[in-house]
């Protein structure tokens, strides 16, 4: 008889410094997939679930039992009733397919709900109680996870993506699935160890193909090899969650027993802590540098990072570029009200438009359905995107703005090209992200600049008011 492996997850990156809460409706309009719907969405795609499906599907002695997967775009704290509803539905659906021989979980690792600051630790703990100690639980994590002892204790092996931008999600899903397969076949007995660090890596410094992360990941791989570990994950952490587990960590998975690798990892970080603090170049600093950079220049709007929960509606970077006379440029802004204003006019019309504190004489270039498909591996592993109705205008200064109805992170170049907009037509392209958009735009933007704009995802975490974080922690405290 085949071994039955349940698949389930609640996935959210929660920014606790955002006033607007994340509701059940945000999950319903994001991804709410049950049973076979999970397989239909992700089979053959680039998500971690795609890798799980692939790995289990090739095993004649294993059967994947999809239960429930919910995901909402990063945002504010999840409403208590919304979280409790998701947990109730997940456990109810799991009850319908029990018994199982194993369970693969797909949390983000930085979820926070009202009354449940360690949201992922809570639902993983409930899962462990339901399954019992003898049923193995493996899974995946986003490297921006803030991993708690409760999360580590409730699972046998969690594996984080090893790239940022996240282009290895499918491969990570395969790793988690293969750990489950080998466990159920009796080949390994995974033992997990969490190593929390007194450090929070700046979001600006979390690009894995560049120093200091490139060297950090190489060292982690060396430690993994020297200690014969099944897995060693670097958790860069998500600094915009005011919870005790916020910060950088390592997850070690050994076969049968703990290792003594923790101190080597801690020492590496302590000796290089200042390398992980970032440059934090503001708009005024960046603008004089742009004239000598090959175009188009990708401007990463760090303070309004949609992938970090920000609203995606800031016009500060657009205003600064227009004031400096730099263009033509392109920027995508989440502004449903602006879309509605534009829909009153026909293509080619000129009209006065105000969005936030920005005013312009706009020329309407197009109105469109904002759905598009991404067929290649990009950050997030998504295939199907839906920005809602969109409007594209040209400003009085000659820049192009796409207004979207739904808040959509800039993970795909198709956000432009599906609407006949090409980066080569612009001197600069602004993307509301920090590292994630690089996977989409690096091939067409020879220059990339991170801009520390004001906002709820600003690069300088020391400017945020934390009440629950651990102490001491660099860069808040010098001595760690």
Image (cartoon, rainbow, N blue to C red):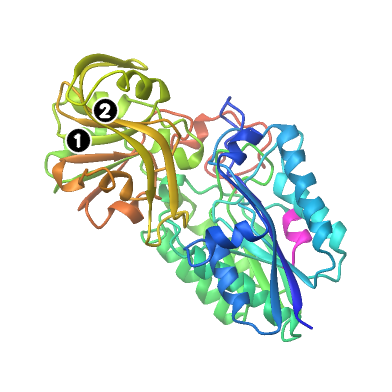
Whole-percent x and y of residue 425?
14, 43
Q: Secondary structure at mark 2?
A: helix
Image quarter of residue 228: bottom right
Q: Which residue is mark 1?
A: 329
Residue 384 lies, in percent from the top left, at 45, 51
Q: Which residue is mark 2?
A: 318
- The answer to whether the residue labelled 2 contacts the one labelled 1, judged by CB atoms less than 8 Å apart, is yes
Q: Residue at x 37, y 17 (%)?
A: 356
Main SS type for the magenta part? Answer: helix
**Which residue is pictured at 62% across the width and 54% down the height?**
197
Task: Report crowding for label 1: few under 14, some 14 to 19, many 20 or more residues within 10 A (C-alpha).
Answer: many
Depth check: give the residue in front, 316 or 78. Answer: 78
Magenta region: 149-156
- In this rendering, the count of numbered labels is 2
Q: Determine the residue located farthest toward the top in the rendered image.
A: 352
Q: Is residue 105 left or right of residue 326?
A: right
Tell me if 367 is positioned left or right of 155 in this view: left
Front-most of 358 and 255?
A: 358
Above/below status of 162 relative to 1: above
Front position in the image: 197 or 230:
230
Q: In the image, what residue occupies the spot 49% across and 70% down?
A: 219
Observer able to see residue 102:
yes
SS category of the residue bearing label 1: strand
Q: Position of residue 420 (x, y in %)?
A: 22, 44
Can residue 234 be seen?
A: no
Name above or below for residue 344 compared with residue 258. Answer: above
Q: Residues within 10 Å of mark 2 (few under 14, many from 20)?
A: many
Distance from disc 2 to disc 1, alpha carbons, whole Å, reads 8 Å
- Is residue 378 one of those drawn in magenta? no
Among the 4 quarters of the image, the one containing residue 19: top right
- Which is more N-terminal, label 1 or label 2? 2
Q: Where the N terminus falls, by quadrant?
A: bottom right
């Amino acid at each position: 008889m085949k071994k039955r492996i349940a698949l389930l997850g609640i996935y959210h990156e929660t920014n606790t410094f955002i006033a607007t809460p994340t509701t059940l409706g945000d999950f319903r309009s994001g991804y709410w997939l049950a049973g076979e719907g999970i397989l239909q969405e992700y089979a053959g795609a680039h998500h971690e679930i795609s890798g799980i499906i692939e790995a289990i599907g090739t095993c004649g002695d294993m059967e994947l039992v999809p239960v429930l997967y919910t995901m909402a775009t990063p945002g504010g704290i999840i409403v208590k009733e919304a979280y409790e509803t998701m947990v109730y539905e997940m456990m109810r659906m799991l009850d319908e397919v029990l018994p199982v021989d194993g369970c693969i979980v797909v949390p983000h690792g930085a979820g926070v709900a009202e009354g449940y600051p360690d949201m992922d630790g809570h639902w993983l703990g409930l899962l462990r109680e339901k399954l019992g100690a003898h049923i193995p639980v493996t899974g995946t994590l986003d490297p921006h996870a803030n991993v708690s002892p409760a999360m580590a204790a409730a699972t046998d092996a969690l594996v984080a993506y090893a790239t940022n931008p996240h282009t290895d999600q499918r491969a990570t899903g395969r790793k988690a699935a293969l750990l489950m397969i080998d466990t159920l076949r009796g080949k390994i007995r995974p033992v997990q160890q969490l190593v929390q660090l007194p450090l929070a890596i700046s979001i600006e410094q979390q690009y894995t193909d560049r120093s200091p992360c490139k060297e950090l990941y190489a060292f982690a791989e060396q430690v993994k090899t020297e200690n014969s570990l099944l897995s060693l994950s670097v958790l860069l952490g998500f600094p915009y969650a005011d919870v005790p587990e916020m910060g950088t960590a390592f997850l070690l998975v050994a076969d049968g027993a703990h290792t003594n690798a923790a101190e080597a990892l801690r020492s590496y970080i302590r000796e290089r802590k200042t390398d992980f603090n970032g440059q934090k170049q503001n708009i005024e600093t960046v603008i004089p540098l742009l004239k000598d950079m090959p175009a188009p220049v990708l401007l990463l709007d760090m303070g309004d990072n949609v992938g970090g929960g920000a609203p995606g509606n800031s016009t500060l970077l657009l205003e600064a570029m227009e004031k400096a006379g730099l263009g033509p440029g392109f920027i995508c802004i989440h502004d449903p009200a602006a879309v509605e204003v534009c829909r009153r006019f026909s293509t080619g019309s000129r009209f006065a438009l105000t969005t936030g504190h920005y005013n312009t004489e706009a020329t309407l270039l197009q109105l469109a359905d904002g759905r598009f498909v991404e067929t290649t591996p990009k950050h997030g592993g998504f295939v199907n995107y839906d920005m809602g109705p969109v409007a594209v205008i040209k400003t009085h200064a000659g820049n192009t703005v796409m207004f979207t109805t739904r808040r959509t992170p800039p993970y795909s170049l198709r956000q432009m090209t599906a609407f006949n907009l090409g980066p080569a037509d612009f001197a600069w392209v602004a993307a509301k992200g920090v590292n994630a958009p690089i996977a989409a735009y690096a091939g067409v933007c020879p220059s990339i600049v991170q801009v520390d704009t004001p906002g709820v995802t600003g690069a300088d975490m020391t400017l945020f008011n934390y009440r629950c974080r651990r102490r001491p922690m660099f860069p808040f405290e010098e001595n760690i």
